Amino acid sequence: MSSIPLLEVSNLSKRFGGVRAVNSINFSLKEEGLLGMIGPNGSGKTTVVNLITGFVKPNEGKILFRGQDITGWPPYRIVRLGIARTFQMVKPFYQLPAFKNIIIPLYSPRVKRLIGGKYGDRDAVALDLLEEVGFERDSFVAYKMARVLPQGYLKKLELAKVMALQPDILILDELFSGLSLAEVASIVPIIEKLRVEGKTIIMIEHRLKELFRIADRVIVLNFGEKIAEGTGKEVMQSDAVKKAYLGSEVS
Amino acid sequence: MQKRKERIDRGIKARSEDISALLSWREMLYLSGPRLLPFIGLAILPLVLGSYWQKVLLSVAIFALLAMSWDMLAQSGMVSLGQSLFFGVGAYIAGVMNHYWSFPPFVTIPVAAIFGGMICTVLLLPVLRLRGIYFAMVTLILPMMVARIIEATKIFGGTEGISGLDPFPSIWFELYLVLAALLGVLFGFRRIMGSDFGVVLKGINDNDRSVMSAGLNVHWHKALSLCMAASVGTFAGAFMTHVYMVVGMAMFSLDYSILPVAAAVVGGEGTFAGAMLGAFILVPISEILRGIGGLRIAFYGVFLVVFVVALPEGIFHYIRQKYYQIERFVEVAK
């Protein structure tokens, strides 16, 4: 493995007016593994994702992907390099059938490059991918319009859209929120399979129990600053984290 | 012998995974009928119409082209209120080339269609990132601006325009040229929107941030769609210039912006066939109402309201739904 980290975030800051949403955050990511990112509401987790993926431009700081400076790049170029994300509020194409939703990432230049210039039958690839994330083939649910699908399927669809891009880094922004325990249990094996395949995953999550079970390392944010980093057990024992989650009286 | 009713399309859909999906000539006709109808209809129509209605048919075809161009833009997330920009730019390119350099129509029209489309795309490039009403506002203003610029600077004949341009060989040539273009655009656009490229355009209309995060350049795809739609509009303009044998500021008038939108909405958005059908209904109505005189626009407005209220999803969607519901008798037991 090379010495250059896969992703390196240094001194990253973003202000929205007077609010310091993200305040000089540093972390780096080695290849393979699952990084969890937790923190109370409004702590800046989603803003960090938006900064890395180019949806928001940082005020200060640098983002390096395999040593290449990608700070301020437009989102589509960052995706082509291999960083793909899901949205916390699902953003499917409501007017299209579920499997046509996957056609759009499959159409991207990244996928074309990866599979050697030929697209083949995208519909078949899309249907296979949807089956992988849990769209039962017999039920024809993959042919339904996205607007009629329940939340659980929409989250799975969001995951399938990212997987279609075959990214090096997957950023999953609160994939489990709004899902039942059974639905979470059906998605966890898919994420573990992606890890086995050598993908690097960043997961933002409020369900700490599920996250700690699969995460190698966890970063805790509060008020836009990194207050702890380590394994799940380590960060939970940190006083700063207890304070952030439970209030100052406890500590 | 017992019989029961069954929808024709059910049987076909159930077998559609297979290549040998069609079992009889009836099913073949059921599927190909709607596609053959415009071909046959448009081939016969010029032959049965009188010379006045042939002229009306020309104008129907022009508005149908502009309406389909509007539909293309609408399906890619751009609501245009300025189809007359395309029409006028095409008209002026053809007019100027013909008048100053005396190029014949068969050169000016293709050039106007291709380069005119590109020019319109470049003009609208800065506002491609706008959505909905903001994009609509800019497209509404642009043709008016261009018309005022021509008026103020007196270029290309100023308010008088340029007259005495080359005509087409005959009315038959005009009719069949524009009807062929109409069919080409109808089936071409339908095919494009059915392809994976078209799925991307529909995705942009639906959720452009999601398209971005799929690694696709939204502005590039919007520009491609705009270029195709604008080319159709500039073709219409260039064609009409040679029919009228004049080009003037009237080519940028609001009629060419608003009527195509009305046609697409009345006929049904998102299918191109609906936009064409809308033009085939609205333009003749407008012609018939010409006899009434002053109240023409008022009656026309009433027609529009009736269509939109009675069939908000559009005439074409209604007809298609009814067509799918056609039933036949099938034997269930001897």
Image: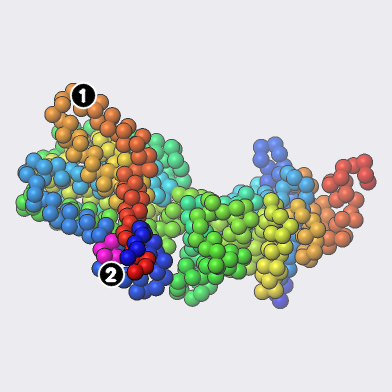
- The stretch drawn in magenta includes residue A100: no
Residue B201: quadrant of the picture = bottom left
Place of residue B136 in the rendered image (x, y in percent of width and height, measured from the top left): 39, 38
Q: Is residue B154 above or below residue B10?
A: above
Helix, strand or loop under label 1: loop
Place of residue A145 in the rendered image (x, y in percent of width and height, measured from the top left): 50, 55
Residue B151: quadrant of the picture = top left
Residue type at mark 1 is Leu
Q: Magenta-highlighted stretch: main secondary structure?
A: helix
Q: Chain of mark 2?
A: B
Q: Which mark is residue B295?
A: 1
**Which residues, given as a range, are shown in magenta?**
B26-30
Place of residue A63 in the rendered image (x, y in percent of width and height, measured from the top left): 66, 58
Instruction: Tell me the residue that label 2 is attached to.
Output: B24
Q: Is residue A30 above or below residue B139?
A: below
* Nearest to the observer: residue A236 or residue B304: B304
Q: Chain of mark 1?
A: B
Residue type at mark 2 is Ser
Whichever of labels 2 and 1 marks the residue nearer the N terminus, that label is 2
* Nearest to the observer: residue A33 or residue A129: A129
Place of residue A77 in the rendered image (x, y in percent of width and height, measured from the top left): 54, 60
Q: Is residue B144 above or below residue B217?
A: above
Look at 56% across and 57% down and name the residue there: B213
Look at 57% across and 51% down and name the residue there: A91
- In the image, which is nearer the foreground, mark 2 or mark 1? 2
Q: Is residue A12 above or below residue B24?
A: above
